[in-house]
Amino acid sequence: MDKVDTNHMNMINTVIQFNDDNASATSGIPAFTTALNDVKTKTILIDAFDQIATGTTKGVTTDTNLLRKAMSDLAFKCAAATFAYATAANNNTLKAEVNYTRNALDRLRKEEVDDICQTIHDRANTNFGNVQNYGIVANDITNLQTSITLYRNSSQDPRQKRISISDAKSQIKTLIRQIIDTDFKGLMDKMALTLQLTNSSFVNKYFQAREILDLGTTHTKLRGTVTSNGIDPVVNADVILYTAASATIAYQTKSDTDGKFSINLIIPNLDYDLKITATGFQDYNEPTVHFSPGEEVNRDVVLSPI
């Protein structure tokens, strides 16, 4: 990411964290939660594109499960709107093609879920002139296709062409602009202002979080390796950052075939508890790891066999 994108992402992640920490303030506004969840889905896509743009994935993203969740969330949203239109139009064929609950999408085998999501995308896109009246916008359909593409790339689907670095950088800018213009300015900022009379403290702090701070060209990240003896890599170790002194997972990834791992776009000026686990090894625990703005924290961890 360039400096502008990095600053925007630090702001976006700060807003997400603030609202997660103060969820009770907006609990009476369901549409606020919906918009916030849309932002979280888009940040998953942004992180995947950033890994491609920076060449940290070796062609395979470490966040396949997160990408599947993002894809399924978007597919369910598009399916629900298309199903509603099909019901109103008495189009039983279309209803059958998009009749998937969120749980049904989760139960699909990994080899078929992207095909089902592709069908949902295609039907929503074909009928968008009518479907847009039932709760989705054009960006939802576009982002669904984006998530399908990323998921197939992460799964090394031979049908999917690789995403170029230039395309990844362009998609990052597009998604960031969607979050700021649509989710923040168009929705969440306006809904936050409805609380001005009843919870001015929340509103003031919300807009403080919305300020874009110049944190430099380097975003806050965690890098490292996991080995069994300082040499042999431990593959697929779970690397988890918890919000300090809690059981809340803030970030999670896995080590690759070289034992390397990376977590980007970490919200700075906060403390996290680091835990690394792998089958057959004792857990590694490190409490209160602090991340300063723009800092790259490195950890080379040697796990002991059980």
Image: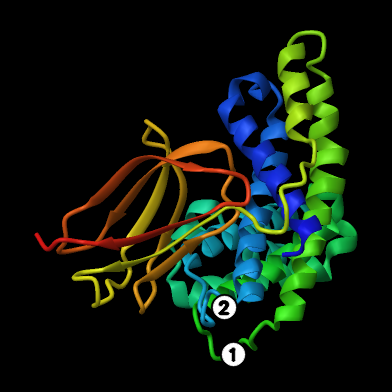
**Crowd rating for badge 2 (residues with CA inside 10 Å; few <14, some 14–19, many 20+):** many
Q: Position of residue 61 (x, y in %)?
A: 52, 72
The residue labelled by disc 2 is 152
Q: Residue at x 76, y 64 (%)?
A: 2
- Marks 1 and 2, the one that precedes in the sequence: 2
**Crowd rating for badge 1 (residues with CA inside 10 Å; few <14, some 14–19, many 20+):** few
The secondary structure type at the circle numbered 2 is helix
Q: CA distance from mark 1 to mark 2?
A: 8 Å
Residue 90 in view of the camera: no
Q: Nearer the viewer, residue 27 or 269?
A: 269
Q: Nearer the viewer, residue 109 or 243?
A: 243
Q: Residue at x 82, y 47 (%)?
A: 180
The residue labelled by disc 1 is 159
Determine the image quadrant of residue 71. Answer: bottom right
Give the number of marks.
2
Q: Residue at x 16, y 55 (%)?
A: 282
Q: Position of residue 210 (x, y in %)?
A: 77, 35
Q: Residue furthest top?
A: 198
Q: Nearer the viewer, residue 154 or 50?
A: 50
Determine the image quadrant of residue 19. Answer: top right
**Amino acid bearing label 2:** Arg
Compared with 80, 54 (above or below) is below
- Tell whether label 2 touches label 1 (CB within 8 Å): yes
Compared with 127, 90 (above or below) is above
Q: Position of residue 230 (x, y in %)?
A: 24, 71
Compared with 18, 171 (above or below) is below
Q: Residue at x 39, y 74 (%)?
A: 256
